[in-house]
Image: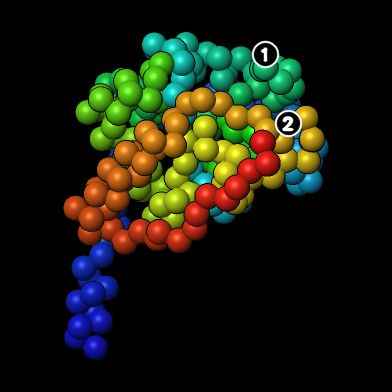
Amino acid sequence: MGILLALLLAFVAPPKPHIVAKPIPFGAARKAEMAKYSEIHYGIDSWRLVHPRVIVEHYTATTTFSSAWNTFAANTPDPELNELPGDCAHFIIDTDGTIYQLVPLTVMCRHTVGLNYTAIGIEHVGTSDAEILHNPKQMASSLALTLWLMHRYDISLPNVIGHAESLTSPYHRERVAAWRCQTHADWQHADMNVYRSRLAALARSEHVAISTTGHAVSTRC
C-alpha cells in the first residue's frame, strides 16, 4: 500500500495557466447556426461541446491578436466553405504568451472540418509553424494550456494534433462528401512531432501523468 500511495502522489495535476477572458459574441442566433451546422455535418442537433476528445493546434496566419479576434467575432461565412456560423477557436495565444479565451469550453467552435463536434481549438498568432516553435513565450503558454486541457478532459497525447493532421484523426467524421478531404496546412506532422515531444517533456518535468493511447489512422484522401 505504501508503494501504491507513493506512486499516486508522484503524479500531480498541472497548474491552470493564466487565461484572459476575451469572449466573442456567441449568442442564441450563432448557437442556432452551430446546431444546424452540427446536424448537417455530424448528425448532432446541438451546439454543445460534450467531453472533447481532441485538441487541435492552429496558427492564425495573421500578425496580431486583434485581427484574428475581429475575424472570429464577425461571424461571417468563411470564404472557403461559405457556411455559417463563421470560424472561431476556443483560445488564441498571442506572440507575448498571453492566453485569451474566446468561447466557453462547453460550446462547439468551427475550426476544423470533421472534428468540431469533439475538438478544442487553439490558435497561435503567427504565420508559420516554425515561427511559433521558435517563440519561447508563446510555446511555453501553448504547452501549459494544452497540458492543462489534456488533464482536465483526459485527452491522450496522440489526440493533440495539428490542423494538417485532421484527416488522420480516428475521431474525424464528415457527412458532407464534398468536405471529407478538407483540411489546412498549418501544423504539419513533423512540426507536431516536435510539439508533442515538448509536451511530453513538460508533463514529465511537472510529474503529470498523460496517456499515450491512440494513433493516427489512414485516410482515403
Where residue 217 appears, as percent x and y from the top left, is 57, 50
Residue corresponding to mark 1: 79
Where residue 111 appears, as percent x and y from the top left, is 58, 30
Seen from the viewer's position, the closer of residues 87 and 216 is: 216
Q: Is residue 58 visible?
A: yes
Which amino acid does the dot numbered 2 rest on? Trp
Where, quadrant-wise, is the N terminus in this rendering? bottom left
Where residue 187 appears, as percent x and y from the top left, is 44, 30
Please tell me whether mark 2 sits on a helix, a strand or a loop. helix
Within 10 angstroms of label 2, few (less than 14), some, or many (20 or more) residues?
A: few
Residue corresponding to mark 2: 179
Quote the CA–CA distance across marks 1 and 2: 14 Å
Q: Quadrant of residue 31?
A: top right
> Which residue is at a point 22% across and 71% down the rendered structure image?
9
Seen from the viewer's position, the closer of residues 180 and 46 is: 180
Seen from the viewer's position, the closer of residues 196 and 66 is: 196
Q: Is residue 38 visible?
A: no
Q: Quadrant of residue 34?
A: top right
Which amino acid does the dot numbered 1 rest on? Pro
Where, quadrant-wise, is the C terminus in this rendering? top right
Q: Quadrant of residue 20?
A: top left
Within 10 angstroms of label 1, few (less than 14), some, or many (20 or more) residues?
A: few
Left or right: where 95 falls relative to 173 = left
Please tell me whether mark 1 sits on a helix, a strand or a loop. loop
Image height check: is 171 above or below 136? below
- Which marked residue is nearer to the observer: mark 1 or mark 2? 2
